Amino acid sequence: MGNSLDFLTTIAPFTPDSFFNDYWEKRPLVISGRSPNYYAELMTLVDVDTILYTLKPNWKELRLVEQGRYFMGNFMRPDGTPDIAVIYQAYIQGYSLNLLEVQERWSPLAVMVRDWETYLHHPISVNLYLTPPNSKAFNPHFDNHDVFILQIEGEKDWQVWQPTVELPGQEFTGNPFLSQDHLPPCIIKTRLKAGDLLYLPRGWVHAASTGERTSLHLTFAVLVYTWSDLLDGMLNGASDQNETFNRALPVGFMRDPAAQSAIQNDWDKIIKDLIQSSQLKAGIDQMGDRLIKQMKDPLPNRYFSNIEQLSQIHLKTIVKKTAGTFCRIIVQENEIVVNYPGNQLKLPKNWENALKDINANLQLIIQDFPGTNAEKLTFVRQMVGSGLLTIETEELTTPLGD
């Protein structure tokens, strides 16, 4: 398992410093002129047929839309599977296929999304858009998340207008669609071709349409964690340790000026307690656990094959952290806790350096781990069995002994 595509190759030739300093949350970016096959390992037009037929997305995941109007007919069978013949007819009539959360159904995307999440530390969701010629799915609108638009095949014309709402958050409840009469100044008109990329910070108004060619693109939505999320995590940590944060606000505080004055008098002390309780790390840790929980499961990576080989491993066997595994190592007083998608392990403290080497994605030889030979082999078998480690040695020779 693995892709040559990752976040860094997606934004190439821009470096992370130039992208995050000049564009991230600031302004759009168009990258063009790359090979038409730049994203071919992620998906092709032919793969859309496979996704519909084999993976059978349900009505919550598949939408048919044309100029903001959803297909009125029933394109799902009673058993919840898509009626592909009806979908084909809707497509011919000009409706775009919009498949949500496609990373949950397509392995190459799952791998790439996990790489992005591990690099950015923000959750990612991927939507697929297949638009027939001379059509468009949505009218001008903005999103409450940053988007990276990867043009997989065909072409699509994009217009981008200045934002009317600056960095709208996930809680934004206004209307994101704008009428032609209320559009801000247009700053970008571009045709994305296969291999191109368009980055849009949240809030930037955009719309797209096809010409004579079909368009297949993927939208990577970055559902950013914000300072507000960090403060929530800090407050949650503080409330677990300091009963002050769990006290009720004064009775009648919404209508009583005296109660509001009492809140104001206590406010400085509350904030001081929050700062002095050193909850910043606790807030960051809580968000790390939240990201791991959102990832849900380990990625598919030869797990059952690795289990089959466990009896053959020996001290010179090479192992490595399973690709796409984001994990947090928490050193406590008497043990080390390792959190990663789908699992939690508790280990003795003398494994701290070994776990840090594992988390650094190093290839490691079993004999270099601490402990007796038997302890090393037991540790690796436990790690492989839990999905944290994978066996890198292609051919396992006769064991050297336990």
Image: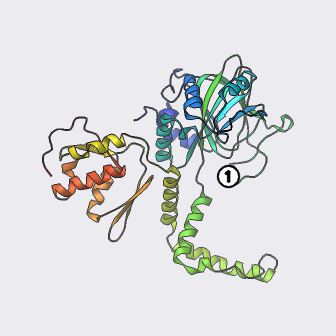
- Residue drawn at point x = 68 percent, y = 38 percent: 78
Count of residue discs: 1
Q: Position of residue 39 (x, y in %)?
A: 51, 27
Residue projecting furthest to the front? 78
Q: Position of residue 151 (x, y in %)?
A: 59, 27
Q: Is residue 17 above or below residue 12?
A: below
The foreground one among 117 and 396 is: 396
Can you say which quadrant of the picture contains the N terminus?
top left
The foreground one among 141 and 366 is: 366
Give the amino acid at mark 1. Gly
Q: Which residue is mark 1?
A: 169
Can residue 175 be seen? yes
Q: Is residue 308 left or right of residue 242?
A: left
Can residue 15 be seen? no
Q: Residues within 10 Å of mark 1 (few under 14, many from 20)?
A: some
Q: Is residue 374 left or right of residue 134?
A: left
